[in-house]
Amino acid sequence: MIPNPPRALLLLAGILLTGCSLTLAAPPPAGDVPFRTQPVPTPTPALPPASLSLKTGQTIFRERCAACHGALGRGDGPQAAALRARFPDARLDLTQDFAARTASLWDWFRVVSEGRPERGMPPWANALSEAERWAVVFYAWSLAVPSEARASAPQRYREACATCHGTDGHAEMAPLADPERVLRAAPAAWIEALRPERVPAHAGLPELAPEIRQALVAYLPDLAFAVADREVRDPPRPTGSAEVSGQVLHGATEAPAAGVTVTLYALIGSSPIFSQTTRTAADGSFRFPEVPVYPEADYLPMAEWQEIAYPAAHPLTLTAGQALTVTLMVFDRTADPGGIHIDQAHWILQPLADRLLVTEIWIYSNRGPAAYGGAGSPGMIFFLPPGASNLQIAEGELGVRYRQEGERLIDTAAVPPGMGYQTAFGYELPLARARTLTLRSLYPVAQWNLLIAGDAMEATGPGIRDLGVRTLGSTVYRLYEVRPPAPGQAVTLALRPRSAAPGWLVPVLLILSAGLAAGIVWIRWGRPVDPIEELARLDEAYAAGEVDEATYRRRRAALKARAMRRMGAE
């Protein structure tokens, strides 16, 4: 089966971007958002697999869901506040009492698959298999009941229900563990049925405490399906406490920043299991005196100023009794894009039999003294060509981080002073109409590369230089250097076929395209970006008076952080 080409190319873009610095002006990542721009209607699914792994569900939940829903499903993830501000009707708390819950497991599965764009919920049908979606639904469903109540549920069932329904829920006269019934009935209906006199067969049932009814209803999926790894539902426990303190400074002046909101997150993987918030004093100081220590967790302090989040450059590791200090930088916000510079633009073309796949990767920096973007600003603007279809975005969704206004694709994420930011997206063009390619940017571009996979197409035009064939990994690309147009101007290249690519080449190129990751981010035709070299060039520019002191200090700090991250990765 041939993989979906646009998705494969955006996966390639994701691989390429792993070598670049991640933005430090966003909440902790919760894993990749699926590469979809519109919800996909999901047909009635088959029953969940015979065996469900809650460990799989927990892993997916931590990577994909906890940033908004919170590690324990309470709607307190690091991105929850921003999502609620944009979607007031967002349903983030998954721990609602079963007595008030009218949505069934089927309903949850459908929402996970198709999404609810009007509430900020993305669709996951393209990113997760059906079995994975069921696993994360069952795990999230179980979060409504405390671990102690879940642990007592089997015994409660044996005492209250097994006489009629059987120890395994499959008694012939009164079967309870019917998969279809468990999936389609709303929890509120099960809770109601457990009340005395509401169901004739339950006439003699004693009044059960609310927490027992909750536990029994939560236990039903365990009866109907072979649920493995039940113990993963128990939250981790702290081994002691520690102290985290520090100071928040204005990045442009290094003056203390008073009244800044600071939140400390404890993260297992990308899943927050604890958070605590305070505000800075007049001298910019903050203190968290009693922080629970989870040995498996990383701790990330994050300052929020003018609706932009600024995490620490590196997560912290705590041990019981330890006291750590950290300094955070915040910046004022501006709607002026004058500090934005495109350091590298990479366009990757893949000709197919009837269409052209285009992936654009933009790597940029903010050389100004203030953070650009955020709520109410124009955002980073990129242009889509006429006829572009099947738009797919890495690390974002239309209607959430991105919006489209005609030919403009707008990335609304804030860009504080610093380097290594990136935006990547892809689309399709009809091959019959792909005779020209227009390159345009609103911002100054330092380097613009065009790569064409295989040998089916070539590009010509003013300011373009054919640098020949590059073999990256096992994949062959033709590399062009394009002289960037002035900001707001455009350059048009002509595309013409060399020869038609055989059909079998498509999946081969898509599979092998990951080899491009080894050499895509270049300085001057094939040299990898080296932050140490960039530091040396920056020092020379400062010594020559080409860079002012404030800009020099900001950029040097960002480059040093990148160099440290690279050394840590190696």
Image: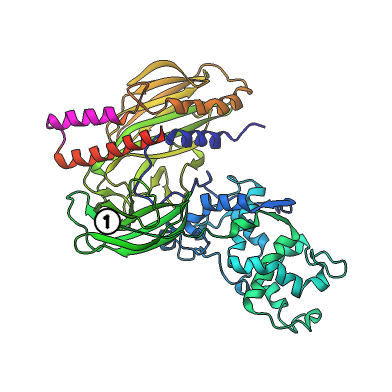
Residue lying at 56% horizontally and 50% vertically, measured from the top left:
59
Can you identify the residue that label 1 sits on?
246
Residue 6 versus residue 150 in the image, above or below: above
Residue 73 versus residue 425 in the image, above or below: below
Residue 5 versus residue 473 in the image, above or below: below
Query: Is 315 on the left or on the right of 49, as rendered?
Result: left
Q: Which residues are magenta?
A: 532-547
What secondary structure is marked by label 1? strand
- Tag count: 1
The image position of residue 520, as x and y in percent, is: 42, 27
Q: Amino acid at mark 1?
A: Gly
**Depth check, front residue: 542 or 314:** 314
Q: Main secondary structure of the magenta part?
A: helix
The image position of residue 559, as x and y in percent, is: 28, 36
Residue lying at 17% horizontally and 50% vertically, measured from the top left:
253
Q: Is residue 448 magenta?
A: no
**Depth check, front residue: 177 or 514:** 177
